[in-house]
Image (cartoon, helix red, strand yellow):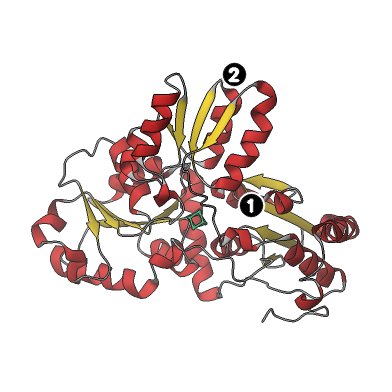
Amino acid sequence: MEMVGNREFSDYRDLSDDECHALIKSAKASLGDDLVILGHHYQRADVYQHADLKGDSLKLSRLASQADSEHIIFCGVHFMAEVADIMSKSSQKALLPDLAAGCSMADMANLSKVSRAWNELKSVLGSEMSVTPITYINSAADLKAFCGEHGGIVCTSSNASQIVSWGLTQQDKILFFPDQHLGRWSGHQLGLMNDSDMKVWDPDLWMGGLSEEEIKSAKILLWKGHCSVHQMFQPSHIARFRDQHPDGYVISHPECRFEVCDQSDFVGSTEYIVETIAAAQPNTHWLVGTELNLVNRIAEEFRPQGKLVEFMSPLVCMCSTMNRIDPQHLAWQLDNLLEGTVVNQICVPDSEKDMARLSLERMLSIS
Ligand code: SF4
Protein backbone atom coordinates (compact mmCIF):
# COMPACT_ATOMS: atom_id res chain seq x y z
CA MET A 1 0.00 0.00 0.00
CA GLU A 2 1.21 3.53 -0.75
CA MET A 3 2.44 5.58 2.16
CA VAL A 4 -0.57 7.63 3.23
CA GLY A 5 -0.39 11.41 3.26
CA ASN A 6 -3.28 13.77 3.93
CA ARG A 7 -4.62 12.33 0.72
CA GLU A 8 -4.59 8.65 -0.09
CA PHE A 9 -3.41 7.31 -3.41
CA SER A 10 -6.58 5.23 -3.77
CA ASP A 11 -8.46 8.50 -4.41
CA TYR A 12 -6.23 9.18 -7.42
CA ARG A 13 -5.84 5.72 -8.93
CA ASP A 14 -8.96 5.97 -11.07
CA LEU A 15 -8.65 9.61 -12.12
CA SER A 16 -8.33 10.12 -15.86
CA ASP A 17 -5.02 11.34 -17.26
CA ASP A 18 -6.67 14.65 -18.19
CA GLU A 19 -7.91 15.18 -14.63
CA CYS A 20 -4.40 14.44 -13.34
CA HIS A 21 -2.77 16.81 -15.84
CA ALA A 22 -5.04 19.62 -14.63
CA LEU A 23 -4.20 18.87 -10.97
CA ILE A 24 -0.46 18.70 -11.71
CA LYS A 25 -0.46 22.02 -13.57
CA SER A 26 -2.44 23.74 -10.86
CA ALA A 27 -0.23 22.34 -8.04
CA LYS A 28 2.94 23.32 -9.90
CA ALA A 29 1.64 26.87 -10.34
CA SER A 30 0.85 27.13 -6.61
CA LEU A 31 4.12 25.62 -5.43
CA GLY A 32 6.17 27.85 -7.74
CA ASP A 33 9.86 27.99 -6.85
CA ASP A 34 9.40 25.59 -3.91
CA LEU A 35 9.38 22.75 -6.41
CA VAL A 36 11.41 21.46 -9.31
CA ILE A 37 10.52 18.32 -11.27
CA LEU A 38 13.39 16.43 -12.91
CA GLY A 39 12.49 14.02 -15.72
CA HIS A 40 14.67 11.25 -17.14
CA HIS A 41 14.63 10.69 -20.91
CA TYR A 42 13.03 7.25 -20.43
CA GLN A 43 9.93 8.64 -18.74
CA ARG A 44 6.62 8.13 -20.45
CA ALA A 45 5.38 11.14 -22.40
CA ASP A 46 2.42 11.86 -20.11
CA VAL A 47 4.83 12.42 -17.20
CA TYR A 48 7.82 13.83 -19.11
CA GLN A 49 5.72 16.79 -20.26
CA HIS A 50 5.53 18.03 -16.64
CA ALA A 51 9.30 17.96 -16.00
CA ASP A 52 10.98 21.35 -15.56
CA LEU A 53 14.42 19.93 -16.31
CA LYS A 54 15.10 16.92 -18.51
CA GLY A 55 18.12 14.81 -19.31
CA ASP A 56 20.14 11.66 -18.75
CA SER A 57 21.61 10.55 -15.44
CA LEU A 58 24.75 12.70 -15.70
CA LYS A 59 22.89 15.85 -16.64
CA LEU A 60 20.24 15.29 -13.98
CA SER A 61 22.79 14.61 -11.23
CA ARG A 62 24.45 17.95 -12.05
CA LEU A 63 21.06 19.69 -12.09
CA ALA A 64 20.12 18.11 -8.76
CA SER A 65 23.31 19.50 -7.22
CA GLN A 66 22.46 23.00 -8.54
CA ALA A 67 18.75 23.06 -7.63
CA ASP A 68 17.53 25.61 -5.09
CA SER A 69 13.95 24.42 -4.62
CA GLU A 70 12.91 22.96 -1.29
CA HIS A 71 11.33 19.95 -3.01
CA ILE A 72 12.90 17.97 -5.86
CA ILE A 73 10.56 15.43 -7.45
CA PHE A 74 12.47 12.90 -9.49
CA CYS A 75 10.48 11.33 -12.30
CA GLY A 76 12.85 8.45 -12.83
CA VAL A 77 13.83 5.46 -10.72
CA HIS A 78 14.90 5.00 -7.11
CA PHE A 79 18.67 5.38 -7.49
CA MET A 80 18.17 8.71 -9.32
CA ALA A 81 16.14 10.14 -6.43
CA GLU A 82 18.89 8.91 -4.08
CA VAL A 83 21.44 10.86 -6.14
CA ALA A 84 19.22 13.95 -5.86
CA ASP A 85 19.11 13.49 -2.08
CA ILE A 86 22.89 12.98 -1.83
CA MET A 87 23.74 15.98 -4.01
CA SER A 88 21.18 18.43 -2.66
CA LYS A 89 21.39 20.58 0.46
CA SER A 90 20.21 19.18 3.80
CA SER A 91 17.25 21.57 3.76
CA GLN A 92 16.00 20.10 0.47
CA LYS A 93 13.85 17.00 0.06
CA ALA A 94 14.07 14.46 -2.78
CA LEU A 95 10.84 12.70 -3.68
CA LEU A 96 9.93 9.77 -5.92
CA PRO A 97 6.27 9.59 -7.03
CA ASP A 98 6.13 5.77 -6.78
CA LEU A 99 8.51 3.91 -4.46
CA ALA A 100 8.18 0.79 -6.62
CA ALA A 101 10.06 2.49 -9.47
CA GLY A 102 13.37 0.67 -9.14
CA CYS A 103 15.99 -0.52 -11.62
CA SER A 104 16.48 -4.24 -12.17
CA MET A 105 20.10 -3.69 -13.17
CA ALA A 106 20.86 -1.75 -9.98
CA ASP A 107 19.42 -4.67 -7.99
CA MET A 108 21.99 -7.04 -9.55
CA ALA A 109 24.70 -5.75 -7.21
CA ASN A 110 24.41 -5.13 -3.48
CA LEU A 111 26.79 -4.18 -0.70
CA SER A 112 27.11 -7.67 0.73
CA LYS A 113 28.03 -9.21 -2.64
CA VAL A 114 30.43 -6.41 -3.55
CA SER A 115 32.11 -6.59 -0.11
CA ARG A 116 32.50 -10.35 -0.52
CA ALA A 117 34.02 -9.89 -3.98
CA TRP A 118 36.38 -7.26 -2.53
CA ASN A 119 37.56 -9.67 0.18
CA GLU A 120 38.00 -12.49 -2.33
CA LEU A 121 40.09 -10.20 -4.52
CA LYS A 122 42.18 -9.28 -1.49
CA SER A 123 42.82 -12.95 -0.79
CA VAL A 124 44.31 -13.32 -4.29
CA LEU A 125 46.00 -9.95 -4.72
CA GLY A 126 47.12 -9.34 -1.13
CA SER A 127 46.08 -6.66 1.33
CA GLU A 128 47.93 -3.99 -0.67
CA MET A 129 45.86 -4.80 -3.73
CA SER A 130 45.58 -2.08 -6.30
CA VAL A 131 41.96 -2.02 -7.49
CA THR A 132 39.69 0.96 -8.23
CA PRO A 133 36.00 0.17 -7.63
CA ILE A 134 33.76 1.90 -10.18
CA THR A 135 30.02 1.81 -9.91
CA TYR A 136 27.63 2.79 -12.66
CA ILE A 137 25.26 5.46 -11.38
CA ASN A 138 22.55 2.79 -11.69
CA SER A 139 23.30 1.43 -8.23
CA ALA A 140 22.22 1.87 -4.63
CA ALA A 141 23.66 4.66 -2.48
CA ASP A 142 25.59 2.24 -0.25
CA LEU A 143 27.57 1.04 -3.29
CA LYS A 144 28.42 4.62 -4.19
CA ALA A 145 29.57 5.03 -0.58
CA PHE A 146 31.68 1.86 -0.90
CA CYS A 147 33.42 3.40 -3.92
CA GLY A 148 33.93 6.68 -2.07
CA GLU A 149 35.57 4.84 0.83
CA HIS A 150 37.86 2.73 -1.34
CA GLY A 151 39.27 5.41 -3.65
CA GLY A 152 36.65 4.67 -6.28
CA ILE A 153 34.17 6.62 -8.29
CA VAL A 154 30.76 6.68 -10.00
CA CYS A 155 30.30 6.77 -13.78
CA THR A 156 27.38 7.31 -16.12
CA SER A 157 26.91 6.12 -19.69
CA SER A 158 28.07 9.59 -20.84
CA ASN A 159 31.47 9.44 -19.20
CA ALA A 160 32.22 5.74 -18.55
CA SER A 161 35.31 5.50 -20.83
CA GLN A 162 36.79 8.64 -19.30
CA ILE A 163 36.13 7.35 -15.78
CA VAL A 164 37.56 3.90 -16.52
CA SER A 165 40.63 5.57 -17.98
CA TRP A 166 40.95 7.63 -14.77
CA GLY A 167 40.51 4.47 -12.68
CA LEU A 168 43.39 2.78 -14.47
CA THR A 169 45.66 5.72 -13.70
CA GLN A 170 44.86 5.34 -9.98
CA GLN A 171 45.34 1.59 -9.60
CA ASP A 172 46.32 -1.49 -11.63
CA LYS A 173 42.81 -2.79 -12.18
CA ILE A 174 39.15 -1.99 -11.90
CA LEU A 175 36.19 -3.76 -10.37
CA PHE A 176 33.27 -2.42 -12.45
CA PHE A 177 29.67 -2.97 -11.34
CA PRO A 178 26.83 -3.65 -11.94
CA ASP A 179 26.67 -3.45 -15.79
CA GLN A 180 29.12 -5.73 -17.56
CA HIS A 181 28.18 -4.33 -20.99
CA LEU A 182 28.97 -0.69 -20.16
CA GLY A 183 32.24 -1.78 -18.55
CA ARG A 184 33.21 -3.93 -21.53
CA TRP A 185 32.41 -1.24 -24.08
CA SER A 186 34.38 1.34 -22.07
CA GLY A 187 37.40 -0.97 -21.84
CA HIS A 188 37.16 -1.68 -25.56
CA GLN A 189 37.14 2.08 -26.25
CA LEU A 190 40.40 2.30 -24.33
CA GLY A 191 42.02 -0.43 -26.41
CA LEU A 192 41.63 -3.37 -24.04
CA MET A 193 41.11 -5.96 -26.74
CA ASN A 194 42.77 -9.13 -25.42
CA ASP A 195 40.63 -11.84 -23.91
CA SER A 196 42.65 -11.68 -20.70
CA ASP A 197 42.15 -7.88 -20.29
CA MET A 198 38.52 -8.06 -19.19
CA LYS A 199 36.91 -10.93 -17.31
CA VAL A 200 33.33 -11.38 -16.11
CA TRP A 201 33.02 -11.64 -12.33
CA ASP A 202 30.04 -13.83 -11.42
CA PRO A 203 29.05 -12.73 -7.90
CA ASP A 204 27.28 -16.01 -7.25
CA LEU A 205 30.45 -18.06 -7.71
CA TRP A 206 33.51 -18.41 -5.50
CA MET A 207 36.19 -15.98 -6.75
CA GLY A 208 33.72 -14.77 -9.34
CA GLY A 209 34.19 -18.08 -11.18
CA LEU A 210 37.75 -17.03 -12.17
CA SER A 211 41.14 -18.59 -11.63
CA GLU A 212 43.84 -16.72 -9.69
CA GLU A 213 45.75 -16.28 -12.94
CA GLU A 214 42.71 -14.76 -14.67
CA ILE A 215 42.17 -12.34 -11.77
CA LYS A 216 45.82 -11.30 -11.72
CA SER A 217 46.08 -10.66 -15.43
CA ALA A 218 42.72 -8.85 -15.91
CA LYS A 219 42.65 -5.07 -16.12
CA ILE A 220 38.87 -4.86 -15.64
CA LEU A 221 36.68 -7.28 -13.71
CA LEU A 222 33.16 -6.92 -15.07
CA TRP A 223 30.31 -7.62 -12.67
CA LYS A 224 27.83 -10.04 -14.21
CA GLY A 225 24.89 -7.64 -14.41
CA HIS A 226 22.88 -6.20 -17.29
CA CYS A 227 19.85 -4.11 -18.20
CA SER A 228 16.91 -6.30 -19.13
CA VAL A 229 15.67 -3.65 -21.59
CA HIS A 230 18.93 -3.16 -23.53
CA GLN A 231 19.67 -6.89 -23.41
CA MET A 232 16.80 -7.39 -25.88
CA PHE A 233 18.61 -5.78 -28.81
CA GLN A 234 20.38 -8.24 -31.12
CA PRO A 235 22.89 -8.05 -33.99
CA SER A 236 20.21 -9.69 -36.16
CA HIS A 237 18.02 -6.58 -35.73
CA ILE A 238 20.86 -4.47 -37.12
CA ALA A 239 21.50 -6.88 -40.00
CA ARG A 240 17.85 -6.73 -41.07
CA PHE A 241 17.81 -2.92 -40.94
CA ARG A 242 21.02 -2.69 -42.98
CA ASP A 243 19.56 -5.04 -45.62
CA GLN A 244 16.46 -2.89 -45.95
CA HIS A 245 18.13 0.51 -45.53
CA PRO A 246 21.77 0.34 -46.63
CA ASP A 247 22.11 4.13 -46.27
CA GLY A 248 20.62 4.18 -42.77
CA TYR A 249 22.46 4.73 -39.49
CA VAL A 250 22.45 2.61 -36.34
CA ILE A 251 22.89 4.21 -32.93
CA SER A 252 22.94 2.31 -29.65
CA HIS A 253 23.26 2.82 -25.93
CA PRO A 254 26.36 1.25 -24.31
CA GLU A 255 24.17 -0.87 -22.03
CA CYS A 256 23.54 -2.99 -25.15
CA ARG A 257 25.60 -6.18 -25.56
CA PHE A 258 29.04 -5.77 -27.11
CA GLU A 259 28.10 -7.20 -30.54
CA VAL A 260 25.29 -4.65 -30.89
CA CYS A 261 27.56 -1.73 -29.94
CA ASP A 262 30.32 -3.04 -32.20
CA GLN A 263 27.99 -3.19 -35.21
CA SER A 264 26.47 0.25 -34.59
CA ASP A 265 27.63 3.41 -36.34
CA PHE A 266 27.36 5.41 -33.13
CA VAL A 267 27.30 4.41 -29.45
CA GLY A 268 26.49 6.72 -26.57
CA SER A 269 24.25 7.84 -23.74
CA THR A 270 20.65 8.94 -24.20
CA GLU A 271 21.78 12.56 -24.30
CA TYR A 272 24.30 11.67 -27.03
CA ILE A 273 21.63 9.77 -28.99
CA VAL A 274 19.27 12.75 -28.93
CA GLU A 275 22.04 15.22 -29.88
CA THR A 276 23.39 13.03 -32.69
CA ILE A 277 20.04 12.59 -34.39
CA ALA A 278 19.20 16.28 -33.84
CA ALA A 279 22.43 17.27 -35.63
CA ALA A 280 21.98 14.77 -38.51
CA GLN A 281 21.06 15.74 -42.05
CA PRO A 282 17.32 15.90 -42.87
CA ASN A 283 15.78 12.84 -44.54
CA THR A 284 18.09 10.36 -42.82
CA HIS A 285 16.96 6.98 -41.48
CA TRP A 286 17.90 5.77 -37.98
CA LEU A 287 17.71 2.52 -36.05
CA VAL A 288 17.95 3.22 -32.32
CA GLY A 289 18.86 0.75 -29.58
CA THR A 290 17.56 2.23 -26.36
CA GLU A 291 14.38 2.47 -24.31
CA LEU A 292 11.10 2.73 -26.21
CA ASN A 293 9.67 5.89 -24.62
CA LEU A 294 12.72 7.87 -25.69
CA VAL A 295 12.73 6.40 -29.20
CA ASN A 296 9.04 7.20 -29.68
CA ARG A 297 9.62 10.76 -28.48
CA ILE A 298 12.51 11.46 -30.84
CA ALA A 299 10.70 9.77 -33.72
CA GLU A 300 7.91 12.27 -33.23
CA GLU A 301 10.22 15.24 -32.69
CA PHE A 302 12.36 14.69 -35.80
CA ARG A 303 9.65 13.55 -38.21
CA PRO A 304 9.05 17.11 -39.51
CA GLN A 305 12.71 17.15 -40.64
CA GLY A 306 12.12 14.01 -42.68
CA LYS A 307 14.18 11.91 -40.25
CA LEU A 308 12.82 8.40 -39.81
CA VAL A 309 13.60 6.94 -36.40
CA GLU A 310 12.96 3.24 -35.75
CA PHE A 311 13.10 1.21 -32.57
CA MET A 312 15.67 -1.59 -32.76
CA SER A 313 13.66 -4.51 -31.44
CA PRO A 314 10.50 -5.95 -33.03
CA LEU A 315 9.34 -6.63 -29.46
CA VAL A 316 8.06 -3.88 -27.21
CA CYS A 317 10.65 -3.36 -24.48
CA MET A 318 10.20 -0.33 -22.31
CA CYS A 319 11.58 0.12 -18.84
CA SER A 320 8.64 -1.23 -16.86
CA THR A 321 9.85 0.14 -13.53
CA MET A 322 10.42 3.64 -14.93
CA ASN A 323 6.93 3.36 -16.37
CA ARG A 324 5.42 3.07 -12.90
CA ILE A 325 5.67 6.84 -12.55
CA ASP A 326 2.34 7.91 -13.95
CA PRO A 327 0.22 11.10 -13.85
CA GLN A 328 -1.88 9.61 -11.03
CA HIS A 329 1.12 9.21 -8.69
CA LEU A 330 2.51 12.62 -9.62
CA ALA A 331 -0.85 14.34 -9.01
CA TRP A 332 -1.22 12.52 -5.65
CA GLN A 333 2.26 13.53 -4.52
CA LEU A 334 1.80 17.16 -5.57
CA ASP A 335 -1.61 17.51 -3.92
CA ASN A 336 -0.10 16.22 -0.68
CA LEU A 337 2.73 18.73 -0.99
CA LEU A 338 0.18 21.50 -1.45
CA GLU A 339 -1.30 20.49 1.89
CA GLY A 340 2.13 20.43 3.52
CA THR A 341 2.58 16.65 3.58
CA VAL A 342 5.66 15.09 2.03
CA VAL A 343 5.04 11.56 0.74
CA ASN A 344 7.62 9.16 -0.68
CA GLN A 345 10.66 11.15 0.43
CA ILE A 346 13.93 9.39 -0.39
CA CYS A 347 16.40 9.70 2.49
CA VAL A 348 19.88 8.26 2.12
CA PRO A 349 21.23 7.50 5.63
CA ASP A 350 23.80 10.04 6.87
CA SER A 351 26.25 7.18 7.38
CA GLU A 352 26.33 6.65 3.58
CA LYS A 353 25.84 10.19 2.35
CA ASP A 354 29.32 11.67 2.74
CA MET A 355 31.17 8.82 1.04
CA ALA A 356 28.53 8.51 -1.70
CA ARG A 357 28.82 12.24 -2.34
CA LEU A 358 32.60 11.93 -2.52
CA SER A 359 32.38 9.30 -5.26
CA LEU A 360 29.86 11.42 -7.19
CA GLU A 361 31.91 14.59 -6.79
CA ARG A 362 35.02 12.78 -8.02
CA MET A 363 33.04 11.93 -11.14
CA LEU A 364 31.69 15.45 -11.65
CA SER A 365 35.15 16.95 -11.20
CA ILE A 366 36.69 14.92 -14.03
CA SER A 367 33.86 14.71 -16.56
S1 SF4 B 1 16.32 0.97 -18.71
FE1 SF4 B 1 17.47 -0.70 -17.66
S2 SF4 B 1 19.15 0.31 -16.59
FE2 SF4 B 1 17.66 1.93 -17.19
S3 SF4 B 1 16.37 2.15 -15.35
FE3 SF4 B 1 15.34 0.65 -16.70
S4 SF4 B 1 16.10 -1.37 -15.98
FE4 SF4 B 1 17.47 0.20 -15.11
Give residue 52's mark.
none
Residue at the left extreme, as displayed: 213
Within 10 Å of disc 1 (Cα), the crowding (few <14, some 14-19, many 20+) is: many
Upstream in the sequence, badge 2 or badge 1? Answer: 1
Of tags 2 and 1, the one toward the viewer is 2
Give residue 43's mark.
1
Compared with 327, 66 (above or below) is: above
Classify residue 37 by image quadrant: bottom right
| Residue at x 28%, y 38% (from the top left corner) | 188
| Residue 87 shows in the view | no
| Residue at x 39%, y 25% (from the top left corner) | 243
What residue is pinned by disc 2? 283
Left or right: where 283 falls relative to 216: right
Question: Mark 1: which amino acid?
Answer: Gln
Label 2: state its secondary structure: loop
- Name the foreground residue: 33 vs 151: 33
Q: How many marks?
A: 2
Circles 2, 1 touching at the beta carbon (< 8 Å): no
Compared with 243, 123 (above or below) is: below
Question: Mark 2: which amino acid?
Answer: Asn
Residue 226 on image: x %, y %? 38, 56
Label 1: state its secondary structure: loop
